[in-house]
């Protein structure tokens, strides 16, 4: 078992799921890692753990989202765990920094939300299931973002005037505000 796998399994086992639906996902993710030593890596087909982060402005009034190049939808930042990642939390932070250009993110200690979703364009073998572990972060005041090659756009959105988002994203934003600013 790799250090990243052990960390991911430990992080998911100690997490306190806020709802019964999130608890069911937590059990699913833990079972996946218990059965698949490669379950944190992209080459674990068709399911693998991914790490993400939702970035809020320092005052919590805005959320930084990326218009994903392949999905063509607005999302939080995130992606696959990499060989250099020592922890699930570290993978989420790395993804946030790489995709937003922000270097001063203050990341939550624990995940806030789990999500399972099908991604049709991730692997040439066919659709995969991303078992996404989502953290939240605050950006420093006046933080300057950038657009990475994985995004068509990166933009601050007022929390009260968001683009068309999946329902889970609204839940994640509310969780992040409550956790980071509450």
Image (tube, rainbow, N blue to C red):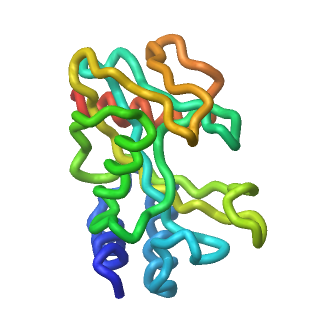
What residue do we see at 45% from left, 78% from top? 33
- Up the image or down, 55 lies above or below 141; here it is below
What residue do we see at 58% from left, 77% from top? 44
Give the image quarter of residue 4. bottom left
Quick check: 69 left or right of 57? right
Quick check: 28 left or right of 47? left
Quadrant housing the N terminus: bottom left
Q: Give whichever of 3, 144 is nearer the camera.
A: 144
Q: How many marks?
A: 0
What residue do we see at 57% from left, 26% from top? 153
Measured as percent of width and height from the top left, residue 103 is found at: 26, 36
What residue do we see at 49% from left, 77% from top? 39
Measured as percent of width and height from the top left, residue 51 is found at: 43, 55
Does the rendering let one see residue 92? yes
Quadrant housing the C terminus: top left
Does the rendering let one see residue 28? no
Q: Give whichever of 112, 1 is nearer the camera.
A: 1
Measured as percent of width and height from the top left, residue 115 is found at: 53, 53
């Amino acid at each position: 078992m790799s250090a990243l796998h052990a960390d991911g399994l430990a992080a998911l086992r100690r997490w306190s799921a806020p709802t019964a639906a999130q608890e069911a996902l937590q059990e699913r993710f833990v079972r996946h890692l218990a059965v698949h030593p490669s379950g944190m890596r992209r080459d674990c087909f068709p399911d693998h753990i991914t790490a993400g982060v939702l970035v809020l402005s320092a005052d919590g009034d805005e959320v930084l989202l990326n218009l994903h190049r392949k999905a063509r939808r607005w999302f939080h930042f995130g992606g696959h765990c990499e060989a250099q990642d020592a922890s699930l939390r570290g993978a989420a932070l790395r993804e946030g920094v790489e995709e937003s250009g922000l270097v001063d993110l203050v990341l939550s200690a624990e995940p806030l939300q789990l999500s399972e979703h099908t991604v049709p364009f991730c692997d040439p073998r066919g659709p995969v299931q991303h078992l996404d572990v989502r953290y939240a972060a605050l950006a420093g005041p006046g933080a300057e973002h950038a657009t990475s090659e994985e995004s068509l756009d990166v933009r601050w959105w007022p929390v009260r005037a968001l683009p068309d988002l999946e329902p889970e994203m609204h839940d994640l934003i509310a969780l992040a505000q409550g956790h980071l600013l509450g």
